[in-house]
Image (tube, rainbow, N blue to C red):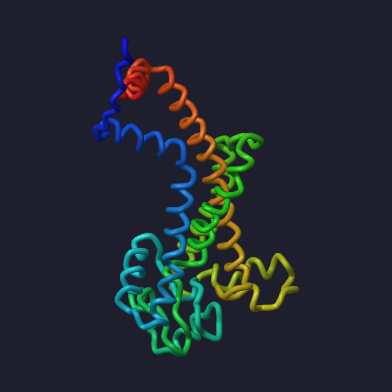
Amino acid sequence: MSATPVTRTSRRPSRVEILTQAKENLVRYWIFFFIAFGLLWVGLPWLAPVLMKMGWGDAAKAIYTLYSFQCHQMPQRSFFLFGPRTMYSLEQIQTAGVDIDNLVELRRFIGNPKMGFKVAWSDRMGSAYGSIPVAALLWWPLRKRIRGLPLWGFALLALPMFIDGGTHFISDLAGIGQGFRYTNGWLAELTGYNIPESFYVGNTLGSFNSWMRLITGMLFGVGVVWFSFPLFWETAIKSKVSERQSPQTIRYDDERKNTY
C-alpha cells in the first residue's frame, strides 16, 4: 500500500483566535506596552517648546491644550527651553507684558523667542509622571526580589505631594505670589534666616518650593509603580495559569495542532 500524501491547508485565523493572541501578547508584554506609552506621554510636554522653536506653532499649541486639562501650566512653576533661564519668577514674566494677576492670561503664557518656551506641564507634573516609567524600568528586573508596597505605604509616599500641593492651593487663594507659600516666612523663622533669601522666596529652580514639588512628585511616582505594578504582574501570572488550565484553551490548542 502506498502512503497517502499529507496535504497542508492554510487558513486565515478567525477573529476569536486573533483576539486571543492579542490578549496573550498584552498579558505577556504589558510592562513594555506601558513603558512605551508612558515615555510617549511624558515626552510630549517637552516636545511642545521644541515645536515652538521650529515654528510649528499649531502642533505645539495642540499639545499645550491637551495637557492643560491635566495641569495648571503656571509659567512660574514650569521649565523653559531655548531661553537664558530654566525657570522665571513672576516679576520676570511680568516684564514680558503678562498680567500676573489674571490667572487665565498667566496660564496661557507659553513664552517667546527671547525668553524661550515653557514645557507643557509644571515641574511637579514632570517629576510625578516622569518618574513612573523610570521607576517601572528599575522595578522590572528586580520584580522577583522586591515585595509590593502595601496601601498604607503608598499613602505615606503620596501624602507629601498632597500636603505640598494643598498648601500651595490655600496660599494661592490670597493671590498668586502673595500667599504664605510664596515667601515661606515660616521656614525662614525655623531656619533662623541662615539660607539665602532666594531659597525661601518664589518658585524658581533651587528654591524651597521648587525642591518640594520635584521631590514630592518623584515620591508619588515611585509609590504608584511600587504599589500597583506588583499587582499587575501577579494578575498577569494568574491569567496565564488559568488560561493554560482552562478546557477552552485546551480545545483551542488541539484545534491548532490538528489544522494540518
Q: Residue furthest front?
A: 1
Which quadrant would residue 215 be assigned to in this image?
Answer: bottom right
Instruction: Report the side of 72 relative to 204 (left or right).
Output: left
Q: Is residue 100 visible in this depiction of the protein?
A: no
Task: Give how far across and how far down residue 153 sits, in percent.
Answer: 59, 40
State which quarter of the image contains the C terminus: top left
For the residue pair 194 and 186, the one nearer the viewer reads as 194
Which quadrant would residue 210 be assigned to in this image?
Answer: bottom right
Q: Is residue 113 above or below residue 135?
A: below
Task: Give how far across and how far down residue 255 sits, in percent.
Answer: 31, 21
Q: Is residue 87 visible in this depiction of the protein?
A: yes
Instruction: Report the side of 38 relative to 61 (left or right).
Output: right
User: Looking at the image, which residue is at 43% across and 17% down?
Assistant: 245
State which quarter of the image contains the N terminus: top left
Q: Is residue 72 above or below residue 75?
A: above
For the residue pair 238 and 229, the one nearer the viewer reads as 238
In the rendered picture of this protein, how many numbered marks are placed on residues? 0
For the residue pair 37 and 98, the one nearer the viewer reads as 37
User: Looking at the image, which residue is at 36% across and 22% down?
Assistant: 257
For the residue pair 111 and 42, the one nearer the viewer reads as 42
Task: Give how far across and how far down residue 52 sits, in percent.
Answer: 39, 80
User: Looking at the image, which residue is at 49% across and 29% down?
Assistant: 237
